[in-house]
Amino acid sequence: MKRTRVHLGAAAAIVAAALACVSGCSAADGGSTDAKPTGSARAAADKTVAREPQACRGGTYTWFNMQDRSVLNGLADPQRVTGGSSKMTKLTEPVRRLRTDQASVVSQGSRVDPKQVLIALSTHLGFTEKDDDPEMGSGLGEPGEYAEIDSGGGEASGSARTVRLVSYSFVRLVETDFRYTCGSGEDRRTTTGHVVTWPSSGGGLISCEEPLDKKASTAAHEAFRLSCPA
C-alpha cells in the first residue's frame, strides 16, 4: 500500500521540504497485542480452531462499530529555523514513536480467511472493486504487520522570520466489527469478528508560528497541540 506525505497549512509556504515517500505500511490496535498461547495451552487452542467448520463462500459481510481516523503515531521535537537566511536548513530532529499498532483479524464461529475479510473491507471502503483480482490483495495492513513511523527529514528553506518546524508521523487507522453470514436454513452459518488495519500512513510538517486550517487532519492538530503550546 502507499504511504502519503502531507504538508499542511501555511507551513507549505514557509518550507520547501524534500521529503521522500515510502511504499508500505503496517498495523494497528492501539499498541496492545495479545500474547500467543504456548505449550499445551497453544495446542489446545489449535485443536479448538481446527474443530471450527470452514465458512461457506458467497456470503454477506455486515460492518458495524467502524472507526476510521487519522492517528498521530510519531513526533519530533520542534526545530528552530532562523529567519533572514536564504540557506536551506536540514531537518535533523528524529521522529519518535508515540504508539505501536498491529494489524489483526480475529473471529468467532465458522472459520473465515483473513485475506478475504480484508478484501471485503477494502471494497466496502472504496479502495478495491468487487471485480478486482483477489490475488492483487486488499491494499490494507495485513495481520501481524506493524504501523511504520515516518522518519521525517528533508530540508527547509529560509523565511523572513524565525520559525519552529515539527515533523510528525500518522497512520489512517480503521477498526471495525463484522458479521459474515452464508448458506440458508439449517446450513446457515454465521461468523463474527473484529478487524484492525489501515489503508495508508505517512508524515507531515507543521510550523508552530502558523495555526492549522480546520480541514487539517486530526493527527496534524494533535501534533500542533503537543508541540506548540500557547
Image: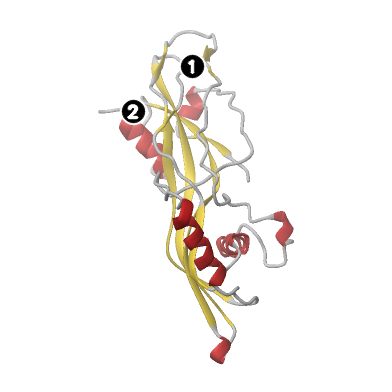
Pick the front one: 190 or 13: 190
Determine the residue positioned at 37% across, 38% down: 221
Asked which quadrant contains residue 99, the reply is top left
Pick the front one: 156 or 22: 22
Q: Residue furthest bottom?
A: 185
- Up-down relation of residue 224 to residue 187 (above or below): above
Mark 1 → mark 2, Cα distance in angstroms: 16 Å
Visible residue check, residue 174 = no
Judged from the image, the secondary structure of the residue bearing numbered disc 1 is loop
Q: How many marks?
A: 2
Instruction: Give residue 45's position: percent from left, percent from top.
Output: 48, 61
- Up-down relation of residue 35 to residue 43 (above or below): above
In this figure, which residue is indicated by the disc labeled 2? 227
Determine the residue positioned at 53% across, 16% down: 157
Instruction: Using a 10 Å C-alpha cutoff, classify the residue at mark 1 as few (fewer than 14 neighbours), some (14 to 19) or many (20 or more).
Output: some
Determine the residue positioned at 32% across, 32% down: 226
Label placed on residue 92: 1
Judged from the image, the secondary structure of the residue bearing numbered disc 2 is helix
Q: Amino acid type of disc 1?
A: Thr
Label placed on residue 53: none
Q: Amino acid type of disc 2?
A: Ser
Pick the front one: 158 or 219: 219
Asked which quadrant contains residue 3, the reply is top right
